[in-house]
Image (cartoon, helix red, strand yellow):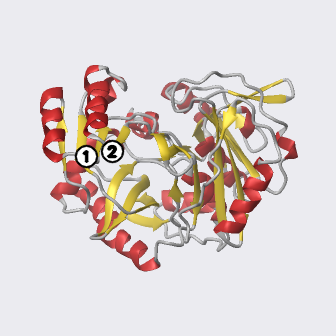
Amino acid sequence: MKVLVIGRGGREHAIVRQFAKSSSVTQVFAAPGNDGMREGAELASIDEMDFEGLTEFAKEQQVDFSFVGPEQPLSAGIVDFFEAKGLRIFGPSKAAAQIEGSKAFAKELMKKYTIPTASYETFTDTAPAIAFIKQHGAPIVIKADGLAAGKGVVVAVTEGEAIAAVNDMLEGQKFGESGSKVVIEEFLDGEEFSFMSFVHSGQIYPMVISQDHKRAYDGDRGPNTGGMGAYSPVPQISQAIIDQTFVEIVEPAVRAMALEDTPFNGILYTGVILTKKGPKVIEFNARFGDPETQVVLPRMKSDFGLFMNSILKGQQAELKWDEQAVLGVIIAANHYPETVEKGALLPDLTKLVGVEVTHAGTKKVADNYVGNGGRVLLVSASGSSIKAAQERVYDQLNSLEWTGFFYRTDIGWRAK
């Protein structure tokens, strides 16, 4: 089979690599991809939002199916566009992608179908939002309603922080149109985990769970980011809790979307927090998480191409997972998640031994890679335990100089 992966980041590199490992896949294309993907895919210089160009390419190359990585083309209706041209593609329709594209839509869905989540209110004006914050106090969570590259959530420890976040979004337009509406919700305390599932034609295939580290700095301090590292499995979350999450959250969400005439196909990402009252939803995404994908997909033992082809045809499929743990650490440009300078030279990555390097924001200049974004690389390793994988990754990272970049030194610290 020939497969087209749409996107350019670390998540897409992990997807490319998984397809390239599949004996059923003869060729992988990535559009637009990044320089680090070249060993697993042929790159096509077509932007993710150029739907016409992508469909023409898929037809020319006789691609068997396409797989969409990022949220922006999904929310803009890339799946509807491909299907209207008679092309097979994996992902949610524009209507179904609202589960990520609008926090308010997702919260209203959960409220209507009694899916456990934090209590909330939605606001478009500053004054009532601030009054709500003063009434409820801190800690409290402020979320931009729309897409914000994983940065549109502020967990405010003080009322002042919460009010500043509301002002930034509603008045300062920090996230543009995405922040013209905000969802303010109660702060939930507990252990977080990411529960991703393949969903197609009502069939749900859950993946192994993972845990992401959102804060920029060690000890879960600093601003929220798109993710600074992840690991899988999550030993402190029992199988009983995983099963409960599937029955009380994932299945009802898929059912609810069908009942709302927005049936969900694609990757349903459920961000979960285990509270004293049981698992509750933090957020839904309509695609693979990043960096969770980079630690979950390497644990897949099934042929990814065969699995995807089967579920796209509506056939029963089976997923098998490796018991080995995988832990990955993000290398980010200095000052991330704020504005960063591009072009800093990365160390010689060929000196990293026994680990996997997943490229996100890199560019190859002559024989060297330079930073070309906020999150630049993910370096991961597998091991018999989280601790073994963690030691392997940090042993390698500490062997190189990362001038112009930083990484957290405690990814996996919550694993027990």
Q: Vertical placement of 44 versus 281: above or below? A: above
Q: Is residue 221 visible?
A: yes
Q: Are marks 2 and 1 in contact (CB under 8 Å)?
A: yes
Residue 299 in the image: state x and y as whole percent: 64, 65
- Left/right placement of residue 7 relative to residue 265 reads right
Q: Which amino acid is tagged 2?
A: Val
Residue 141 in the image: state x and y as whole percent: 30, 45
Task: Please tell me in which quadrant of the rendered image residue 114 appears.
Answer: bottom left
Q: Vertical placement of 176 versus 152: above or below? A: above
Residue occupied by mark 1: 138
Residue at point 40% right, 46% down?
92
Task: Please tell me in which quadrant of the rendered image residue 117 appears.
Answer: bottom left
For the C terminus, the quadrant is bottom right
Q: Which amino acid is tagged 1?
A: Ala
In front of the other: 265 or 333: 333
- Left/right placement of residue 284 relative to residue 311 reads left
Residue at point 65% right, 25% down?
45
Q: Vertical placement of 381 versus 143: above or below? A: below
In front of the other: 25 or 294: 294
